[in-house]
Image (cartoon, rainbow, N blue to C red):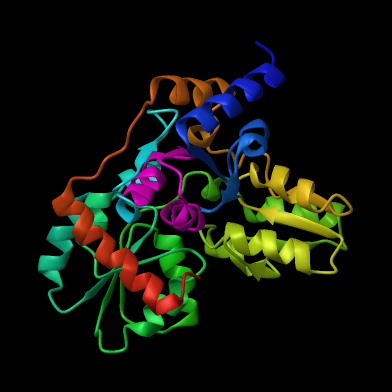
């Protein structure tokens, strides 16, 4: 079946099921094109929580679908590819975090949105790459900050706020593939281009950047800036959206190695099968959902959804 027929069948089933399709910025182009909304994990989950749809097809990785389920437990949340996980989210467990909390009982716990529901349930407040600095700034009474799981995002926040951080030794395998020499090579090839990188990148890469932004921040900057050329230091899937929304501008990947295999598992066939079979449903047990939602809601109140 060619793509046009797949898209037609997906649209028919979507209408029959009263479903919406959400796609993360790192998904492959054809999945982004069939989606109703494209964005980062939190903006998509917020979209899910406000929709009148009965079914949410979340084209991303598992923790993202979990976050949507945390925010709107009354809806049916489907992930088209059950094996689409997040290696960084898997680097921190509920048991590991609880052990660290026992070692630092006075510390406030900040967990990146890129964590499981069980980890969020052990957290005081969640954060995204866009609002991590603001979240930590809000914890004025905390003597220590446990920050999980990304040590590089933690380091970036530490450079903005000199607090006593206790980082977890996690990282994004995709972003660490972007090397300083990649940035320097692209700058040499495109001397007029601005360098925009994600805060999950390593400190040497961040030092070479003109701006450090989340995926949504990168998309907003690309649209608003007068800059006509941008070197993009994040997963290369975002280039599809950037070029589609800004056809007059040029975007260059910092590294062609910055590919998240898990984000590429989902294709149009998976989306179709998900709607046909109503699989794979992601549900969060109520006792975990309630506690995890408290941490996410606290972030939303603190940061206004940033």
- Residue 3, by quadrant, is top right
- Which x, y percent locates residue 201? 54, 57
Residue at image point 87% right, 61% down: 228
Quarter of image, res 139: bottom left
Q: Nearer the viewer, residue 11 or 115?
A: 11
Q: Relative to 226, is 272 on the left or the right?
A: left
As drawn, 36 above or below 190: above
Location of residue 43 in the rendering, given as x and y in whole percent from the top left corner:
51, 58
229 displayed left or right of 103 = right
Of residues 44 and 20, the one nearer the viewer is 20
- As displayed, is residue 197 above or below residue 108? above
The answer to whether residue 5 is left or right of residue 128 is right
Who's the residue at 34% across and 56% down the image?
A: 71
- Percent coordinates x, y for residue 102 in the rendering: 10, 67
Quarter of the view holding residue 155: bottom left
Q: Is residue 95 visible?
A: no
* Residue span colored magenta: 43-69
**Percent coordinates x, y for residue 25 in the rendering:** 59, 47
Q: Is residue 228 above or below residue 135?
A: above
């Amino acid at each position: 079946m060619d793509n046009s027929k797949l898209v037609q069948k997906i649209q028919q089933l979507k209408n029959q099921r009263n479903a919406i399709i959400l796609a993360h910025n790192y998904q492959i182009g054809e999945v982004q094109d069939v989606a109703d909304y494209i964005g980062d994990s939190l903006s998509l989950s917020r979209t899910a929580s406000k929709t009148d749809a009965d079914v949410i097809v979340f084209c991303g990785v598992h923790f993202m679908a979990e976050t949507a389920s945390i925010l709107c437990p009354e809806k049916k949340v489907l992930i088209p590819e059950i094996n689409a996980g997040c290696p960084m989210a898997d680097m921190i467990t509920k048991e590991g975090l609880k052990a660290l909390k026992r070692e630092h009982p006075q510390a406030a716990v900040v967990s990146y949105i890129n964590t499981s529901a069980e980890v969020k349930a052990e957290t005081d407040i969640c954060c995204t790459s866009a609002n991590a600095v603001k979240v930590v700034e809000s914890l004025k009474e905390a003597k220590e900050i446990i920050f999980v799981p990304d040590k590089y995002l933690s380091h970036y926040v530490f450079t903005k706020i000199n607090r006593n951080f206790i980082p977890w030794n996690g990282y994004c395998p995709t972003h660490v593939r972007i090397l300083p020499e990649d940035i320097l090579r692209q700058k040499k090839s495109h001397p007029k281009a601005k360098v925009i990188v994600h805060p999950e990148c390593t400190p040497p890469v961040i030092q070479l950047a003109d701006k450090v932004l989340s995926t949504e921040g990168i998309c907003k900057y690309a649209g608003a800036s007068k800059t006509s050329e941008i070197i993009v230091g994040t997963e290369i899937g975002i280039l599809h959206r950037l070029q589609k929304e800004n056809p007059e501008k040029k975007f260059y990947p910092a590294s062609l190695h910055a590919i998240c295999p898990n984000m590429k598992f989902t294709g149009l066939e998976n989306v179709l099968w998900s709607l046909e079979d109503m699989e794979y449903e992601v549900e969060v047990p109520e006792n975990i959902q309630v506690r995890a939602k408290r941490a996410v809601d606290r972030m939303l109140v603190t940061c206004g959804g940033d």
